[in-house]
Each structure stands twice: as C-alpha cells, then as structure tokens.
Amino acid sequence: MKLTAHRGLSSKAPENTLAAFEYAVRYGAEWIEIDVQLSQDGVPVVIHDQTVNRCTNGSGNVAALTLSQLQKLDAGLWFDEQFRDERIPTLAETLMFAKRHRVKLNIELKVHEGDSAELLCQAVKRVIEDVGAECDLLLFSSFETEALMLMKHLLPDIRRGQLWQKVPGNARDMLTELQAFSVHCDYRFLDEATAKWVKAAGYQLYCYTPNFPELVEQHWRWGVDMMITDVPQNYQHESCVQE
C-alpha cells in the first residue's frame, strides 16, 4: 500500500511546515507532497493558498510579501499552541530536509491567477540545482499544464504528474505531449473505466485526498498506485507514528 503524506503529516502538524515533514518521516512516509509558489522577491516558498490568511497570523497574498516578511509570520499557532513559531519553509530548506532523510517529494507547482509559471519554474530549477537534489527522489505535479511543460524542458529528468479533479476526455493527447509519468485526480471523480485505461496506457495513477480508507477500497482494485492523504495513519495502525 503506497501513500503520500499530503502537505506533510497535516493531520498531526500544521500543513506545509518542517514540523509536518518531521511527523511524516517519523510515521515512515515514503513520499511527502508539498506546494510551492514564489514570494514577492522570487524565492520559492512552501505554502498552499494564494494568501497567508488561513495558515498564518498574517494576511495578504504570498506573491505580495517578501521572503523576510513571510518568515516573520507564525505558521503553526493556528493549528495548536505546541507549534507556535513554526515558520513557512523555503523550497531549499525542504529539499535539504528531504535529502537528509531520504524521503521523496511530490512538488506541486502552484500557479495562481496573475502568477508567472515561467518565473516559478525557473526559480524552482535554480534551487533544485543549488541544493543538488536527486532527480529520482522528486516528482513535479500541477494543475497548470504550462508549468509541467516548462519543467519538461528545464529539468527533463524529473518526472511529471498532471493534476486534474476529473480526468478529461482529451487526457491521452495531453499526457503524451507532456511525456507524463503519472495522473493525479480526485478520488471522488474516478471511475473504474478511467482507471483501467490510465493504467493500460502505462501511467502511474494517484488519488487525492481520501482520508477514509473504506471510501477507496475499490480504487485499489481498479489499479490506483498511491493515495495522497492527510491521514496516512488511518491506513495502518496509529502506533506506526512515534509520538
């Protein structure tokens, strides 16, 4: 049973923080999914939303704040007092963490309205090369096909996964052009016929974000390769996590 810790072990610690990544490693996760976008001064940072409002004590768009401003925010207190002073990590910090722990990263490239996919991809490439991250420990994913196409040219040795809510009718052509490795979709909109053709075409098939194992028992039978979940501990006994 293959699982990815969605935004780290985000049911145990504040999402997309080093604390959540630590919990994922302690749990034994093989993969961690993260979200990456740019600060105002062009630094790739790990945060999901277009704004900092939900997961920090600040407000405003990520793209309107410098790295210095972002890292002054508390990204843990909203989750629990024990995570007070947790910070928004940079992609570089996260890659170095993954390198130390030999954990694989699914890097979702977040391109919000008004963002430049090209600037994001160029900055991510620079960080990956500066850190010396191993290509086989990384996977790019995105809803924005343009970003994945850019990465196909910038870092062709790193695998690419197309994100959809529901796999569209023209998926085959898109995946061929992208030279995709994997298809990522919402488990609620996947049916058996779609799963079967995706697998027959040679792609890995990942589902997000099923937090109740009983809802995806049939998905495993259809050939789904991995579940991207907030609560991987629900799929095995809770004692797997070292408190």
Image (cartoon, rainbow, N blue to C red):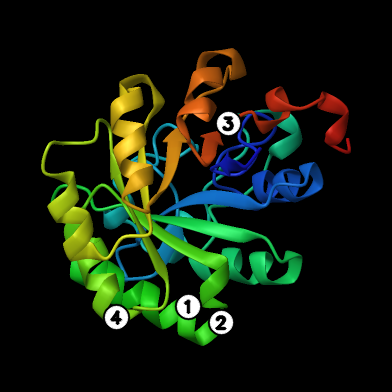
Q: Residue 131 carries which label?
A: 2
Tell which circle, 1 or 4, labels the residue nearer the N-terminal end: 1
Report crowding for label 4: few under 14, some 14 to 19, many 20 or more residues within 10 A (C-alpha).
Answer: some
Query: Which element is circle 2 on?
Result: helix
Count of number-bearing discs: 4
Q: Distance between the residues labelled 2 and 4?
A: 16 Å
Give yes or no for contact between labels 1 and 2 (Cβ–Cβ under 8 Å). yes
Pair 2/4: label in front: 4
Q: Where is residue 237 in the image (x, y as percent from the top left)?
A: 82, 25
Callout 4, which amino acid? Leu
Depth check, front residue: 67 or 203? 203
Q: Distance between the residues labelled 3 and 1?
A: 26 Å
Residue sitting at 32 percent across and 71 percent down?
42
Q: Is residue 71 left or right of residue 238?
A: left
Tell which circle, 2 or 3, labels the residue nearer the N-terminal end: 2
Tell which circle, 2 or 4, labels the residue nearer the N-terminal end: 2
Which residue in the protein does label 3 denote?
230
Report crowding for label 3: few under 14, some 14 to 19, many 20 or more residues within 10 A (C-alpha).
Answer: many
Tell which circle, 4 or 3, labels the residue nearer the N-terminal end: 4
Tell which residue pokes out farthest to the top in this image.
214
Q: Which mark is residue 154?
A: 4
Give yes or no for contact between labels 1 and 4 (Cβ–Cβ under 8 Å). no
Query: Which element is circle 1 on?
Result: helix
Tell which circle, 3 or 1, labels the residue nearer the N-terminal end: 1
Tell which residue pokes out farthest to the front in this image.
200
Q: Is residue 7 left or right of residue 140?
A: right
Q: Residue 60 carries which label?
A: none
- Quadrant showing the N terminus: top right
